[in-house]
Amino acid sequence: MTTPRLEINLSKIHHNARFLVNLLGRRGISVSAVTKAVLGLPIVARQLLAAGVSGLADSRIENIQTMRRAGIEAPMTLIRSPMISQAAEIVRDTDTSLNTELDVISELSKAAQAQGRMHGVLLMIELGDLREGIMPADLEDVVRRTLDFPNIVLKGIGTNLACRCGVVPDAVNMAELSALANAIDATFGPIISIVSGGNSSNLNWILGGADTGRINNLRLGEAMLLGCEPLHRQMIEGLFTDAITLIAEVIESKVKPSQPWGMIAESAFGKATPPADSGSISQSIFALGHMDTDPEGLIPPPGMKILGSSSDHLIVDSGRDRLPIGTEIPFQLNYSALVRAMSSPFVAKIPFSEETALALQLPVSA
Ligand SMILES: *Cc1c(COP(=O)(O)O)cnc(C)c1O
């Protein structure tokens, strides 16, 4: 089979999604499945819907259009603030978007009127991570003006932490979000139906048994696809962390010294840290590099160590075993490695379910 390739185990993704839907459902929290890391791959989106998520969410209108073209009719949310230039497409292809700018909401309103559609708006609040969000002090005014736009339905509020500055979702900022929902309802009547607390990095806070207040939705991507939470990259008990693996092929395999020789300057990707001197090693080169993934985000199988990488090469110490040319090895990926591999035209994407695994000669989960 073609290499490099991402093997996407749909059965494991289904398990992860169902597990999280059930876990959060018991706390009265719905899950919007975030599909951006798999570029809205329709077969994955269908699996997530089958697992019981309440809707699909993506940061790119193109990915949402991919899912729409595949005939997926589930509620669709654009989770990056809309580009004003894309207002018409967003109204046509999504149900809801996350917003922070009145100029954009105004344009969405015009597009919605022109198309005879209603468009849902979730207002995002800045709670410290300093990415998107309305400052809390400005929220009441933004709500008042949003309510005046024709064909716009204010669905609720939300926030996003941990993505830019690593601000941790905790009792304090989550209570603030709940309090803001209460304050708006107190001023305008009960209008806030969705309070979307955040992304996979909110799971620690929830699993810690926190009082979830008015939070009744999370937008989850990484946890469902990779089985871990992004704050400390710990696996979440009960989830598969190997639902997606990247398979690469050995193109050179030689015993070489661990130390380079000659005069040393910068390498292709800046300053190279000199490798430790461990005498002669079994060095394998895989046909995989920065053009295919984020090599820093790969985890090799036990006994192997990644030594370096360039655009097209991944250099690995294969330990005691010399790997024959053509050997295929599975690597686990972090979020960065996954999104880069999904976006690379050089990497094949091979979704499979356990029923089809045998026919494709792919590994079946333990
Ligand atoms: C990417 C993103 C998410 C999902 O994040 P994960 O860490 O993959 O769960 C949620 N909300 C917003 C606004 C995002 O951009």
Image: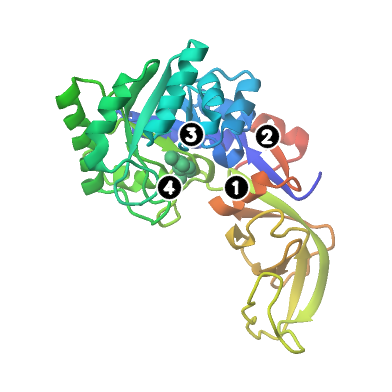
Dot 1 amino acid type: Val
Q: Which of the pair 103/169 is nearer the observer?
A: 103
Q: Which of the pair 178/78 is nearer the observer?
A: 78
Residue 264 located left or right of residue 144: right
**Residue 322 in picture, x, y percent from top left:** 78, 69
Q: Which mark is residue 352?
A: 2
Q: Which residue is labeled 4 in the image?
A: 236
The reply to whether residue 214 is visible in this rendering is: no
Q: Which mark is residue 339?
A: 1
Dot 4 amino acid type: Ile
Disc 1 packing (10 Å; few <14; some 14–19; many ≥20): some
- Which mark's residue is nearer the viewer, 2 or 3? 3
Q: Earlier in the sequence, mark 2 or mark 3?
A: 3
- Which mark's residue is nearer the viewer, 2 or 1? 1
Question: Where's ligand 1: which quadrant?
Answer: top left
Q: Which residue is labeled 3 in the image?
A: 82
Q: Which of the pair 170/136 is nearer the observer?
A: 136
Q: Are marks 3 and 4 in contact (CB under 8 Å)?
A: no
Q: Give the position of the C terminus as an image quadrant.
A: top right
